[in-house]
Image (spheres, helix red, strand yellow):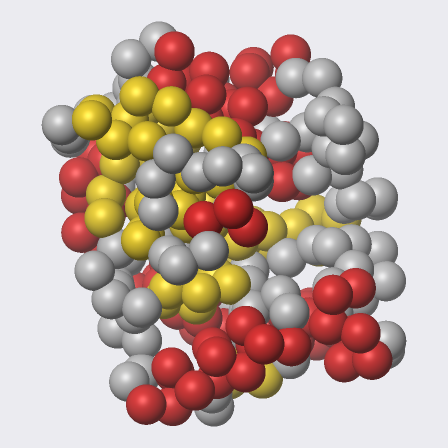
Amino acid sequence: MNMRGVILAGGKGTRLGELTRVTNKHLLPVGPYPMVYHPLKKLVGAGLRDILLVSGTEHMGDFVELLGSGREHQCSLTYRVQDEAGGIAQALGLAELFCANVRCAVILGDNIFLDPLAPLLEEANRHPDFAWVALKRVPDPGRYGVAEVVGNRIVSIEEKPAQPKSDLAVAGIYVYPPDVFQIIHTLKPSRRGELEITDVNRWYLERGRLGWSFLHGYWTDAGTPESLALANRLVMELPPRY
């Protein structure tokens, strides 16, 4: 598989309050593992062996101490530092040299989900020039990027809309072809001052190059006290499939 993995584990985790006062949220426990183990196990379980982890300056040493070279996880790990919070797309841009001329499978480090990753990657690989996203029905779509699907095609994507057009959240699982980095270079910061991954996905959508897979099992982020507690409960009741 001509693909490399990217885990985005930056951000301050401020929504978790005191829990992240002295550590990165992706090092907090979810079930029997630190949170970051879950995306790592998903990528390795899907057959990827070259993986890049992006995080901030404050806790990069903790990730290196925890994960090392990746040998214990049957992979080779590379690390890149995101100097300041600038959005998911900016963090992904740090993988440009690592993913030169290969596709990249990207997981946000706080995404906890049941389904194995391999079937999604297999679907994406049938369309090598496409970007690919995972969709999941949620009760509160306004918290996320929201996709509107007609037939089998995504027709619109909105970031945290006040009036969502569907209940399909764009989960933090993406596959991109090598030209994604050219697109990131053209992005302008949003009103939040960040480079938005929704703008990247919309670029592919407008050119008929955006595909999707549906997540059938549970999925949650773990970025708030409530969603962290939910993630722990889900993982302990039914362990993720890697």
| 97 or 15: nearer the viewer | 15
Tell me if I can see residue 152 in this picture: yes
Most extreme residue toward the front is: 163
Q: Quadrant of residue 148?
A: top left
Looking at the image, residue 214 sits to the left or right of residue 191; the answer is: left
Residue 100 appearing in the image: no
Looking at the picture, how far across and down is residue 109, in whole percent? 55, 60
Front one among 19 and 37: 19
Quarter holding the C terminus?
bottom left
Question: Where is residue 60 shown, x and y percent of the image?
Answer: 76, 62
Residue 33, compared with residue 41, is above or below; it is below
Q: Position of residue 50 (x, y in %)?
A: 45, 51
Q: Residue at x 49, y 37 (%)?
A: 163
x and y percentages locating residue 180 in the rendered image: 49, 22
- The residue shown at (73%, 72%) is 16
Q: Quadrant of residue 239?
A: bottom left
Q: Residue at x 80, y 31 (%)?
A: 193
Q: Quadrant of residue 227?
A: bottom right
